[in-house]
Image (cartoon, grey):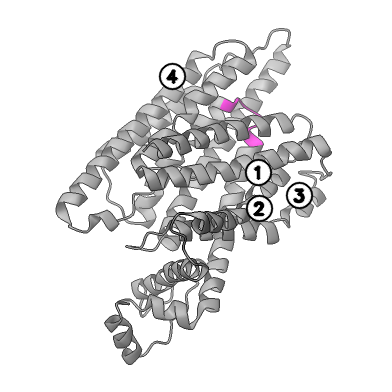
């Protein structure tokens, strides 16, 4: 528990440091997509780091065992998608999984060997095909994640860090709404109330005076600043919506049922980083050509900031996953929400004056909404535990924890 709490502190510190660095570097280097691309590309090192950790443990695991764990989890995803849509082809672009030719005799042998769904047999017989399917899946998920995260990087340049942080953490509420639509989760009044409270909080932060220092500015300049803040708030809200959708799609297509593997999570995260590195550099010249972001190389100081931002992103992901593994999803989710008061404190230090009431009350409303949602999730988990003997293997709801952004 102590180590999990320490990991959570690292996670919160990394998020705050990322936000400050992103805001600082964009004062002289306004290239939000390039900063995003570098940050998410660094995710490729997460799997080698996890592998090194597994090899250095008191009871090290072999590379063959780690490889099999990742392949079996990936094969389970393929088998589950095939079974859930047996006899029908999905029109969705996320349906990447062709039917696997497996005879009844092969399935009988797999079942006798303790491989009820045939995933181990699939992982052993067609490992390259399994990996290719995961690459294709993560490439599309990376597209959604990067486009949503890009809005966050742009928003940081328009509005306060505390508002960006508070609004981003609304992604869990959007995840709940999308889970109703895509995962057929039942509607609960308590959770709807939580969403409503959070929406009120965002409205307070976006529509009322933020208390920014506007002394010495003309009326036109004040209006321009206010409009810039409103644009930043709307971009943050759109980012939260996109991240919420990403969470739900990730849960639906990239999380195997009844098979939990932290190594597979980092395997998928590394594939997201590889997809970003190898494919999603393409928008950089595209944004340059159409004039949205005229690309120029950063100088040594700016690149040092960008690389630091990327490393803090890796630390955030690692800290979040360690906290999740050593504590509980509930503890990790509530802990991540501490980034809201942390960023409020940082904003007060940087700005040199207290934050406006609208930001404090709005952030408080979002925290209250999240606390309500968390309580509802806890009650659901207790109810499922009472109803099923194997509920410990059920994955937590996607509405519990905000996904790592950078």
Question: In what quadrant of the picture does the C terminus appear?
Answer: top right
Question: In what quadrant of the picture does the N terminus appear?
Answer: top left
Contact (Cβ within 8 Å) of mark 3 with mark 2: no
Contact (Cβ within 8 Å) of mark 2 with mark 1: yes
Front-lying residue, 124 or 162: 124
**Where is residue 136 drawn, in percent x and y?**
57, 68
Main SS of the magenta segment? loop
Q: Which residue is mark 1?
A: 310
Magenta stretch in the rendered image? 154-161
Q: Which residue is mark 2?
A: 41
> Which element carries disc 1, helix, strand or loop?
helix
What number of labels is visible?
4
- Tell me the residue at 73%/7% (across/down): 216
Q: Earlier in the sequence, mark 1 or mark 3?
A: 3
Query: How many residues crowd around disc 1 within 10 Å: few (fewer than 14), some, or many (20 or more)?
Result: many
Q: Which mark is residue 287?
A: 3
Front-lying residue, 232 or 41: 41
């Amino acid at each position: 528990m102590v180590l999990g709490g320490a990991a959570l502190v690292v996670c919160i510190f990394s998020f705050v440091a990322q936000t400050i660095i992103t805001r600082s570097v964009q004062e002289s280097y306004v290239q939000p997509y390039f900063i995003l691309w570098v940050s998410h590309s660094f995710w490729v090192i997460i799997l080698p780091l996890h592998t090194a950790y597994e090899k250095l443990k008191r009871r090290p695991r072999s590379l063959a065992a780690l490889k099999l764990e990742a392949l079996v989890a990936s094969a389970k995803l393929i088998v589950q998608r095939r079974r859930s849509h047996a006899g029908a082809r999905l029109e969705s672009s996320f349906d990447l999984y062709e039917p696997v030719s497996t005879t009844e005799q092969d399935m009988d042998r797999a079942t006798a060997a303790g491989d009820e769904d045939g995933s181990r047999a699939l992982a052993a017989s067609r490992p390259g095909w399994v990996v290719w399917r995961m690459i294709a899946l993560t490439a599309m998920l990376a597209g959604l994640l990067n486009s949503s995260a890009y809005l966050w990087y742009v928003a940081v340049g328009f509005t306060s860090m505390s508002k960006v942080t508070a609004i981003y953490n609304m992604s869990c509420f959007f995840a709940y709404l999308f889970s109703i639509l895509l995962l057929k989760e039942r509607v609960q009044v308590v959770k709807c109330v939580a969403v409503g409270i959070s929406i009120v909080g965002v409205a307070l932060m976006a529509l009322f005076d933020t208390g920014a220092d506007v002394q010495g500015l003309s009326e036109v300049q004040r209006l321009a600043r206010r409009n810039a803040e409103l644009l930043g708030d709307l971009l943050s809200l759109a980012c939260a919506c996109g991240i919420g959708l990403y969470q739900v799609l990730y849960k639906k297509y990239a999380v195997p049922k009844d098979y939990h593997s932290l190594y597979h999570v980092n395997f998928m995260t590394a594939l997201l980083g590889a997809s970003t590195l190898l494919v999603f550099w393409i928008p950089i010249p595209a944004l340059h050509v159409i004039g949205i972001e005229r690309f120029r190389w950063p100088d040594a100081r700016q690149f040092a900031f960008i690389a630091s931002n990327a490393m803090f992103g890796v630390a955030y992901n690692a800290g979040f996953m360690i906290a999740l593994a050593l504590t509980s999803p509930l503890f990790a989710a509530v802990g991540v929400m501490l980034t809201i008061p942390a960023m409020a404190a940082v904003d007060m230090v940087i700005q040199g004056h207290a934050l406006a009431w609208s930001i404090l009350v709005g952030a408080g409303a979002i925290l209250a909404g999240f606390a309500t949602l968390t309580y509802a999730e806890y009650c659901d988990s207790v109810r499922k535990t009472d109803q099923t003997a194997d509920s410990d293997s059920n994955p937590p709801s996607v509405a519990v924890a905000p996904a790592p952004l950078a």
